[in-house]
Image (cartoon, rainbow, N blue to C red):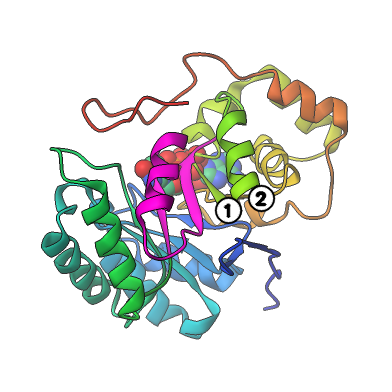
Amino acid sequence: MTTPSIPTLSSASGAKIPVIGFGTSQLGDCADIVATALRLGYRHIDTAWKYGSEKGVGQGIKAAGVPREEIFLVTKVSHEYLKAGDFARSVDESLRNLQVDYVDMLHIHWPTVDNIPLAETVGALAKAKRDGLTRHIGVANFNVALVEEAMRLCPEPLATLQAEYHPYLDQSRVLEFCQRVGLVFTAYCPLGRGKLFKDPVMAEIARAKGRTIAQVALRWQIQQGNIAPIPRSSDAAHMVESLAVFDFALTDDEMRRIHGLARPDGRIANPEGRAPAWD
Ligand SMILES: NC(=O)c1ccc[n+]([C@@H]2O[C@H](COP(=O)([O-])OP(=O)(O)OC[C@H]3O[C@@H](n4cnc5c(N)ncnc54)[C@H](OP(=O)(O)O)[C@@H]3O)[C@@H](O)[C@H]2O)c1
């Protein structure tokens, strides 16, 4: 089978990230799903200790037989483990779960809690990189002020910010910031966890393009540049569809209409006590 080749985005720090990735939250024991995604051409797999999907991802990588160096593998350290010692133990456990010697990207999953100094956590993040346990480092769910603070305190350069993004959520301030400082923006919930699929504007544009709503949503993101969406699917037909977004373009008017769908209550992931003051 020939698999589609996926363009990459580059961070200022030199990470090369396949522009469409594959999400694995809520998939649990996902070995077969991940193996299918890899066979269909996905080369950027997003997991996290918290998802409970790392073991399945590791098994899926082995089963697919895709060489390790062809895969951009991402995991995250959960907010329970932000003290340096806990952080290091969590990284070791993730690598064991994934059956790999290194990941390509390691994220702090949510900003610091319980007054653990951010300097300690980003120090542990940088140490994981210096010890060869991850090629690149990044943060998830940080607001702009926290990313700036992390960049100032971290002894190694950050490559990515992972945060929620879909047509119902305005992230213009964060996107402009990432572009300016050379961080690739990884977009989670890029399909709004399915909330977009009944949207009449999305449906109209999809009809006009002869595409699906999922494809239009992903195209809208990648066409902005510097955004790597990571849709999750357990359906092979959907996986194929979400990779087929490089052979059409949205017009300026279509892009503008989709931007116009953003609404104040559009955010999906907003856990109390963990979420920062969003931009
Ligand atoms: N850093 C963080 O805090 C954070 C938070 C949330 C998510 N994430 C990451 O981002 C990934 C994606 O976000 P998400 O899983 O919340 O939601 P999502 O990708 O926006 O939506 C997933 C839903 O869309 C459906 N879907 C996928 N492709 C489709 C297609 N081509 N056509 C129709 N339906 C399609 C899936 O159903 P089917 O299975 O039927 O295809 C699933 O129900 C996660 O898996 C995780 O890796 C990170």
Residue at the spot of label 2: 226
Q: Residue at x 61, y 61 (%)?
A: 12
Q: Mark 1 or mark 2, which has the lower sequence index?
A: 1
Instruction: Determine whether, in the image, residue 134 is placed left or right of residue 4.
Output: left
**Tag 1's secondary structure?**
strand
The answer to whether mark 1 and mark 2 are in CB contact below 8 A is yes
Amino acid type, label 2: Asn
Q: Is 120 covered by the magenta stretch?
A: no
Crowding around mark 1 (Cα neighbors within 10 Å: few <14, some 14 to 19, many 20+) is many
Q: Against 62, is 98 above or below?
A: above
Instruction: Determine whether, in the image, residue 137 is placed left or right of residue 211.
Output: left
Q: Residue at x 35, y 67 (%)?
A: 57
Amino acid type, label 1: Val
Residue 262 place in picture, x, y as percent = 60, 19
Q: Against 215, is 32 above or below?
A: below
Q: Against 261, is 197 above or below?
A: below
Q: Against 178, is 33 above or below?
A: below
Instruction: Determine whether, in the image, residue 39 is placed left or right of residue 56.
Output: right
Disc number for residue 184: 1
